[in-house]
Image (cartoon, rainbow, N blue to C red):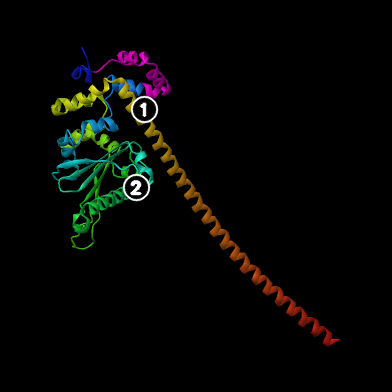
């Protein structure tokens, strides 16, 4: 009798079947051989149901949450994250010329316009980069500027700043940075600009940060307590036992998994998806190394600046002491001359 996800999804292939198809095509065999043993095992695990598929892979997520054919799924997720009922109007193309080519650092990126005209950008980062707040502020500013240019171009002389709607930046971190771990019981963080008085003013930019690694720690300790917990479990958990538990308690998620496992039956396409995710991960790792190296350089520069300050201070002290010694030498010479004059006068 089949166990784990295969019990519920009989279309899942065995490892042997997947490997057989790979060996039948030289191109697929070469690609598979180019991966490390760990990467090969990871691919075989999720295609054979030994582990769950990573739903946040770009191709899988966009298939499941396609705003054109299945808008209700994304609407549900966004409504829970933004704490308000939302309606997806349409998908918008992501900008390939994004600031500093940041789009190349993303595991997944989907942009939609909501019914009220506001924009929501959902992103996933496999590795948490340094400076998440600064990066997100730049993403949001870039998105706001794109909206401004588009709306102004459409409206022409009739343009008004009231036509500019909110932009929501929603970032899911597979591995979050250290500042998030200072709050181990919190895995949903909402942020927006506020005024220190009762002034009501719409500053347009809002953020939601979801550290999925912290969510999973809470999930394993407390279980699925809210509807949002259920969705985050679907998005981030690849433990087969939890997948079975999810579809048993919430059978409405079974069709979503069926769609993903149906995609996995196309081994060639799934290998392409996996290979692209590995490429993005490599870029992520390089960027993280650059950030960490820059941190070390900045730290070393701070140490050098501190040492230079100490050297300058010591130099000033030495200069001051030399000046005092010179003054003493001058005083000694003056006294010596007085003594010589006194001795000469006595003679």
| Residue 278 visible, this orientation | yes
**Circle on res. 130:** none
Is residue 31 found inside the magenta-colored segment of the image? yes
Q: Quadrant of residue 54?
A: top left
Question: Which is nearer the eye, 342 or 234?
Answer: 234
Q: Is residue 311 above or below residue 24?
A: below
Residue at 27% x, 41% y is: 93
Helix or strand or loop: what does disc 1 sit on?
Answer: helix
Label 2 and label 1: CA atoms lie apart by: 26 Å
Counting residues from the N terminus, which is met first, the one under dot 2 or under dot 1?
Answer: 2
Residue 245 placement (x, y as % from top left)? 18, 26
Q: Is residue 168 above or below residue 235?
A: below
- The answer to whether residue 331 is left or right of residue 147 is right
Residue closest to the eye, 64 or 183: 64
Secondary structure, mark 2, is helix
Q: Residues within 10 Å of mark 1 (few under 14, many from 20)?
A: some
On the image, the x and y values in percent for residue 277 come to 35, 31
Give the label on residue 275, or none: 1
In the visual, does 313 lie left or right of 238?
right
> Where does label 2 land, which residue?
135
Question: Residue at 62% of width from left, 67% of height from top?
Answer: 319
- Relative to 101, 222 lies left or right: left
Where's residue 291, x and y in %? 43, 44
User: Marks 2 and 1: which is nearer the front?
Assistant: 1
**Quadrant including the N terminus:** top left
Queried whether the magenta region covers residue 315, the answer comes back as no
The picture places residue 83, in percent across and down from the top left corner, at 16, 45
Prevailing secondary structure of the magenta residues: helix
Q: Which residues are magenta?
A: 12-40
Quadrant position of the C terminus in the picture: bottom right
């Amino acid at each position: 009798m089949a166990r784990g996800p295969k019990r519920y999804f009989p279309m899942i292939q065995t490892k042997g079947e997947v490997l057989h198809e790979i060996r039948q095509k030289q191109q697929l065999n070469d690609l598979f051989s180019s991966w490390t043993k760990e990467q090969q095992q990871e691919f075989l695990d999720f295609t054979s149901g030994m582990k769950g598929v990573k739903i946040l892979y770009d191709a899988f997520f966009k298939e499941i949450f396609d705003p054109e054919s299945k808008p209700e799924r994304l609407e549900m997720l966004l409504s829970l994250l933004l704490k308000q009922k939302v309606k997806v109007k349409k998908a918008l193309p992501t900008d390939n010329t994004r600031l500093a080519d940041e789009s190349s650092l993303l595991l997944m990126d989907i942009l939609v316009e909501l019914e009220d005209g506001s924009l929501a950008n959902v992103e996933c980062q496999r590795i948490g980069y340094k400076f998440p707040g600064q990066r997100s502020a730049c993403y949001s500013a870039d998105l706001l500027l794109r909206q401004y240019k588009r709306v102004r171009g459409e409206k022409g002389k009739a343009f008004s700043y009231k036509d500019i709607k909110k932009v929501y930046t929603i970032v899911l971190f597979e591995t979050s940075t250290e500042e998030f771990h200072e709050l181990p019981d919190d895995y949903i963080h909402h942020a927006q600009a506020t005024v220190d008085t009762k002034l009501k003013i719409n500053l347009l930019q809002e953020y939601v940060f979801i550290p999925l690694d912290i969510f999973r720690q809470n999930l394993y300790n407390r279980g699925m307590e809210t509807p949002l917990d259920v969705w985050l479990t679907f998005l981030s958990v690849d433990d087969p036992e939890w997948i079975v538990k999810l579809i048993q308690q919430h059978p409405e998620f079974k069709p979503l998994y069926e769609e993903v496992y149906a995609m996995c039956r196309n081994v060639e396409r799934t290998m392409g998806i996996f290979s692209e995710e590995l490429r993005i991960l490599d870029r992520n790792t390089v960027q993280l190394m650059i950030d960490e190296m820059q941190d070390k350089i900045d730290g070393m520069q701070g140490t050098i600046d501190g040492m230079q300050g100490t050297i300058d201070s010591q130099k000033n002290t030495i200069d001051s002491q030399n000046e005092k010694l010179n003054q003493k030498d001058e005083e000694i010479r003056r006294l010596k001359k007085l003594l010589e004059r006194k001795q000469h006068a006595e003679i």
